Amino acid sequence: MNAITQITSVKDRVSAAEWEARIKLAAAYRLAAREGWTDHIYTHFSVRVPGPDRHFLINPYGLTFDEITASSLVKVDIDGTLIDDPSGLGINPAGYVIHSAIHRAREHTHAVLHTHTTAGIAVSAQRNGLLSISQHAARFHNRLAYHDYEGIALDLDEQQRLVADIGDRDALILRNHGLLTSGRNIEQAFYNLFYLERACAAQIAAQAGGAELIILPEQVAEKAARAFEKAVANERPQLHWAAAVRQLERTDASFRN
């Protein structure tokens, strides 16, 4: 608890744009905790710091998602140097390897979210991956990438393969590992994660029922995927995000500290 209680607000020493990014990322951690998308102190979300420097924010290694605040987030540069570490806890090395790879390679990507949920891991361990058996899964029809497991992500040379596998897509299943989504902003990345997590949970539940599964026809799945893309273009993720944050603030707004 000392690492938490000793953290003072960084609001007065960062730009207004960075402070806003910190609040949004802290909210994403708290929302993930509410949804049960956590693996204790493991896994990580990141967001790029607005401005010319190639810095991004990520969680301190040792705090649970429901403890994250705007001021506790660690600012790190693309080469792994800690620029600002208010808690002194540092960061998860695997988090740096995964997140820096995507932030370095994809200029348009400003947020990256990675989870180890039971449903996500379970689907990641299935040879056929995510099946088109639900509307939620249709969101990712022909729009989902896969990356084979190479062990705990500590080797920098894995970055080039990770980047090659995700390509220009915003959702990735890390085989035998978990899920990863990204977006041009935190709202898009969170929207993608919400649908991918729900799709995986629905798949495991449907498989557990033991009945024959109905796979959506290609034409139908593609039609649904395009409708989701239109919704994203019409700022559906922003509506989704705003509603989720309102839910969060009704019970606990301490993420803003």
Image: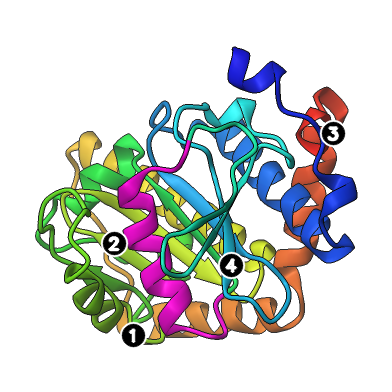
Label 3 vs label 4: CA separation?
28 Å
The residue sitting at 45% across, 35% down in the picture is 61
Label 1 residue SS: loop
The x and y percentages for residue 132 are 32, 66
Q: Residue 41 appears in which quarter of the rendering?
A: top left
Could you say which is closer to the camera, residue 180 or residue 120?
A: 180
Identify the residue position indicated by label 1 in the image.
Answer: 167
| Picture quarter with the N terminus | top right
Sequence-wise first label, 2 or 1: 1
Element marked by disc 2: strand
Label 4 amino acid? Answer: His
What is the C-alpha distance between the residues marked 2 and 1? 13 Å
Q: Which residues are magenta?
A: 90-109
Residue that carries the numbered disc 2 in the rendered image: 173
Q: Residues within 10 Å of mark 3 (few under 14, many from 20)?
A: some
The disc at residue 55 is 4
- The kind of residue tagged 1 is Gly
93 part of magenta stretch? yes
Tell me the kind of residue under disc 3: Glu
**Callouts 3 and 1 close, C-beta under 8 Å:** no
Q: x, y (%) of residue 218?
A: 32, 83
